[in-house]
Image: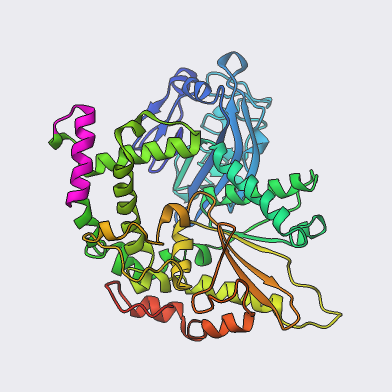
Amino acid sequence: VFQRRMDGSVNFYRPWDQYKTGFGTAAGEYWLGLENLFHLTLRKTYELLVDMEDFDGNKAFARYSSFSINPEADGYRLNVSGFTDGGAGDSLTYHSGQKFSTFDKDQDSSGSNCAKSYLGAFWYKNCHYANPNGVYLWGADGSINYAGVDWYHWKGWNYSLKTISMKIRQLVMKGREDLHQLAGRLSILFPSLLSEENLRRISFLTSSKHRCVSSVEAFQEALQWHWGRSEAEYSHEVDDELMRFFERCRGYVEGVEKNRTALQEVEKFKHGQEMEGVRRRTAERLGLPHHRLTPDLVEAAFFLCSYELSIKSLHSPWCFLFDESDAKVLEYKSDLKQYWKRSHGHVISSLSSCPLFHHVFRTLDKAGRPRRATEASPEPASILVGHAETLLPLLSLLGLYKDKTPPTASNYHSQHGRSFRTSRIVPYAANLLFVLYDCQRGPRLQLLVNETPVRFPGLESEDAPLYRDVRATYRHLLDGCDFHRECEGRTGGRAPNTEL
């Protein structure tokens, strides 16, 4: 975060030298400093996220895929591009290419001093569509025209926002590469669906989280590159009710997410003999007293190892703290958490995905039904982008990866052959594909998890059973999986699991 307004407690009408070095506190209203910002963005690609909220509790954001500023010798000139709308509109691209101005250092393109006129400091042009460092007012206020904490394309010039923050982060190229490669592989695997002529007819739906929007954009870029198209072909729709259903399910939030007993198996294992062995061995390798190293610190070191390995392809120094047996214990601990929090452990976890389940089958029904010659063809592909927390409940609802004996704190040594392994089920760029084939006896449906064919529970004799047989298998869910009834009427606990 390099800029934050939240309560008017800090005066932002300040001279050049203070904007250069920074002021405020990181926990409150804050300006990082232009010199610090320049060095941060000097040699790496950063994206910018501008989050904002009005006094009625409405929120919006604007995201820019590229952000940097030039050195002081060039007036800390702003470079920003690649706008994505999160409801706020684009009030910043207008300012790109401008030098930074304060009341005592006028570098704008106006004949007047914009910083003086509008009581702020910014990359003013002639003069502004954004004034995040203006006077902190209280919502709609025309008493000081254009001088509030403004974002014109959302609330206009005479509405001062309750909060606004500007934050940058370095793009993790590995994530984009994973999505690029996935799009390329799927284009080869399904050339008649993801074809050049179908590009404009593919629908995209995503969670509002910025990492998901970035994933959609990376996938879309790769499709364009695959077919040699340079012009923008795509848009996307944001739908958190569908892709973040778990946040809206009261039974899940109260019964699992906020219920301390819901993850009791995880807590028992965390303090059990297997984790204790890992903790002691790790402490010995570090030369630390055992009591100095908690299970949480051990797990943090393991995550650092895995992140650097997966993102940077580095055998991190953190990895030398663990041997294969340690890694298996820590993997099991992670699987326990996901099993009891997002999967088969509590029935409400999987039932919370009812909206997504019904959406999938409505889409398949539409694609598979007979149509007249005059009717338009259905969309060739519907691509939904969410989270591991989106995918795991749906996989569980479908009855997949459900071992006969559930994993618990006490049966680690009998679980080495388990099918529920989240590192394989939901790795980076995890995907679930429903592929409908037009066949002589009727449509057939194939299921693929991470591009590998998986057979439907109860229909294990065929890779691609008739679609009507799949619907019959899941009839109890198609008729009875009601999100509002399940989420308002259930809490967590180890209720009998009614899924397949």
Of the 4 image quadrants, the one containing the N terminus is: top left
Figure label count: 0
Occupied quadrant, residue 452: bottom right
Residue at the image point whose x is 52% and y is 58% from the top = 386
In the image, taking residue 160 as reference, residue 69 lies left or right, namely right
* Foreground of the two, 488 or 25: 488
Q: Can residue 88 be seen in this snapshot?
A: no
Residue at the image point whose x is 41% and y is 40% from the top = 306
Occupied quadrant, residue 408: bottom left
Instruction: Check if residue 286 falls in the magenta segment.
Output: yes
Magenta span of residues: 271-289
User: How far from the left and from the top, in percent, is residue 22?
Assistant: 42, 24
User: How far from the left and from the top, in percent, is residue 271?
Assistant: 18, 51
* Foreground of the two, 2 or 127: 2
Residue at the image point whose x is 23% and y is 28% from the top = 286
User: How far from the left and from the top, in percent, is residue 430?
Assistant: 53, 54
Q: How is the image coloured?
A: rainbow
Of the 4 image quadrants, the one containing the C terminus is: bottom left
User: How far from the left and from the top, in percent, is residue 67?
Assistant: 59, 32
Q: Magenta stretch mostly in which secondary structure?
A: helix
Instruction: Check if residue 304 falls in the magenta segment.
Output: no
> Is the residue 5 above or below the residue 438 in the image?
above
Residue most toward the top? 73
Occupied quadrant, residue 81: top right
In the image, taking residue 422 as reference, residue 444 lies left or right, namely right
